[in-house]
Image (cartoon, rainbow, N blue to C red):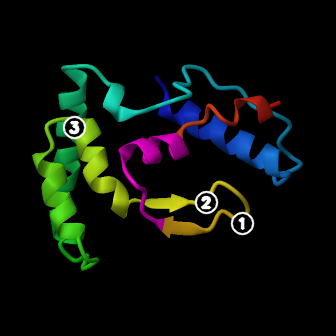
Amino acid sequence: YSLGANIVTKYLGEESLHGTLPKCIGGGAAMGNPLHIHSGTIAFPWNMLLGAGVKRSILQNATSLRKHHEPGFQHAMKKALLAPTIGKLDDAAAPYLIRNDSYPPYATRIGFKDGEEYWWESSSHRYVGHVS
């Protein structure tokens, strides 16, 4: 799978759909695009290995993360570190992840309901039909 392909496809599709794709871009191609991603569907042992990789990143950035004083953030990070799988980790962290609206002007907000909403918003499957 290529998450980069997912990002490019989502960008091209969103921008084409809303008429905001720069004129200098005529189309695009992506290979290995997973289209619809959800960490809760990743099978053992990969779900645990991916979760371990994300936990490692959280621990490596613990000094910076401790500086966040958003109510509930520290508890969510502890819950993420205790999560057995990447899916459960995503559910714990999703309310504190940065997101952009799916429509212009693509305003930045914080928080998803859960990991499922995070991956729904991050997946490109809804936009493939708008890529030329």
Mark number, residue 101 = 2
Q: Position of residue 123 (x, y in %)?
A: 54, 37
Closer to the camera, 57 or 115? Answer: 115
Place residue 54 in its image quadrant: top left
Place residue 68 in its image quadrant: bottom left
Q: Is residue 48 magenta?
A: no
The kind of residue on which mark 2 rests is Asp
Classify 10 Å Cα crowding around label 3: few (below 14), some (14-19), many (20 and above): many
- The span from disc 1 to disc 2 (Cα, nearest Å) is 8 Å
Q: Are marks 1 and 2 in contact (CB under 8 Å)?
A: yes
Q: Are marks 1 and 3 in contact (CB under 8 Å)?
A: no
Residue ID for mark 3: 51
Disc 2 is placed on an element classified as: loop
Q: For the magenta stretch, what is the residue range?
A: 110-122
The kind of residue on which mark 3 rests is Gly
Instruction: Single out the residue that lies furthest toward the front.
Output: 113
- The span from disc 1 to disc 3 (Cα, nearest Å) is 33 Å
Q: Are marks 2 and 3 in contact (CB under 8 Å)?
A: no
Report the mark closest to the observer, 2 or 3. 2
